[in-house]
Amino acid sequence: MKWLILRRFSQISILLLFIFAPFWIIKGNLSSSVLLNTVPLTDPYLLLQSFFAGHTIATTALIGALIVLIFYLIVGGRVYCSWVCPINMITDAAAWLRNRLGIKGGNTLSRQLRYWILAMSLLVAFVTGTLAWELVNPVSMFQRSIIFGGIATLFIGIAIFLFDVFIAKNGWCGHLCPVGAFYGLLNKISILRVKATNRSKCDDCLECFAVCPEHQIIKIPLKGKNSNPIISDANCTNCGRCIDVCDKQVFEFSHRFSSSLSQPEKIIHPQEDLHP
Amino acid sequence: MDNKRRQFLTESAKLACQAGLIGLGVGIYARQAQSTPPQALRPPGALSEQAFQAACVRCGLCVRDCPYHTLKLAQPIDLIANGTPFFIARDIPCEMCDDIPCVKICPTGALDPSLKNIDKAQMGLAVLIDQENCLNFLGLRCDVCYRVCPLIDKAITLNLQHNQRTTKHAMFMPTVHSNACTGCGKCEKACVLEIAAIKVVPRQLALGELGEHYRLGWEEKRKAGHSLIPDQLDLPDRMPDKPSDFQPLPLQGFKP
């Protein structure tokens, strides 16, 4: 539970800071803000859309975006999804309810769709010459209307919750959201990663597969013969749920360049592997 | 292998169609979202509407730094591009801060940082749009819009006109000058009528434009210091020399 509680604490306290903290500490919202009256922070995905829409990027926004980029390149791109984005609390709740109600199937969406939507959002920005996607982007709309007030919060929250419960499992965060897709691209080179260090202790209980919102990414680092134990897939959100639920402490937070295992495995040569 | 390729192509086509459909909807909506209602005014220094919607990341920093709570971020239910800052003059007008904090804090340049003097802002243009109900046009001395104008006697002047109803009074017509009006909206806010007779509207809506080749003769004469056309041949005016020169025909059957 440790990481889950820390995550909720992070998500909620970021919102509370934006709403209640004196403006000299932080003001703005997750799209762009000013920390301690000096440090600019800007969402690089928004700035990328702005660039495609034909706007000349201003220095302050560029510096802000670089700071944010560097931060997520260190801690993992989709840390935005699981540690910052408030929509995550809704989709996690939806996944929990879906599981409790035993709802199965209904999902025909591809997990690749989000990357196509990401490309589409940049294309409409280019074609319309405006931040078109931001007119409908639930992620930016949701956090903005929590921080600045407004009824949008309620409707977006309910809509995404119902979508995830009844229409598609992990539908929004795992299939559609281009913000997550954008930050996922940073994951390709980000440093902090989850690692199946003690995978030799795995007793195949499948708890981690059940709890992971992107369960397709665990299989190879955990079970693949001779595979790198680092979960380096773009879609890992570094949420730490697999670390929380595993009785055998198979997983831990590590870094991209660490491939050592707690217990050495028998090296299986590819030839042997073909004929077990 | 061919089957795999076929599967890949089908899958890609499916994804492209799904994303494309969403994109089409968003694109059409984005076009419509550029037609901001005229009473919604942008903060000082805002770029033209399309450029503004390309630049503004909807962070609300201008809203936070506005000391008079003039600015608001558009909600999805507003008819204004979602999340962008605006103000309604009749609710809370712009107080025209000297240091322009909203422009200063804007990280993206959606509010143009080259605006250093708030008197040069062009948020809109006040127009005395209802000349039937304006009290001054009815011959009364309201003058409120003129009095509250931060650029009194520059942006709004009172121009005297003969009152043809009473035949013996003057009417003081509030007259807006587009070269000075910033569109702050204080006149619209202050108008004493139930619905303001003077309203701030987008400049492109309020202003006409002369043909590019038009020259105002009196302006050209003032600039050059003399008339631009050569002296004209002054023909003598034909005036009746003697009363006998002009003999109107007697009207038939007219008895004075």
Image (spheres, coloured by chain):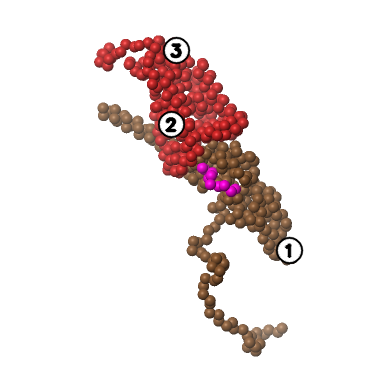
Q: SS for tag 3?
A: loop
Q: Determine the residue positioned at 55% across, 80% down.
A: B234
Percent of width and height locating residue A163: 48, 28
Mark 1 residue crowding within 10 angstroms, few (<14) / some (14–19) / many (20+):
some
Q: Determine the residue positioned at 59% across, 37% down.
A: B64
Looking at the image, is mark 1 or mark 2 nearer the viewer? 2
Say above or below: A63 vs A174: below
> What amino acid is labelled 1 in the image?
His
Residue A182 - label: 2
In the rendered image, residue A65 lying in the magenta stretch gets the answer: no
Outermost residue, bottom side: B244
Residue for badge 3:
A249
Residue for badge 1:
B169
Say above or below: A237 vs B198: above
The front one of B5 and A177 is A177
The front one of B113 and A275 is B113
The answer for how far apart the CA atoms under marks 3 and 2 are is 31 Å
Going from N to C along the chain, the mark reached first, 3 or 2, is 2
The red one among the chains is: A
Q: Quadrant of the C terminus of chain A?
A: top left
Q: SS for tag 1?
A: loop
Q: Quadrant of residue A232?
A: top left
Q: SS for tag 2?
A: helix
Percent of width and height locating residue A179: 46, 31
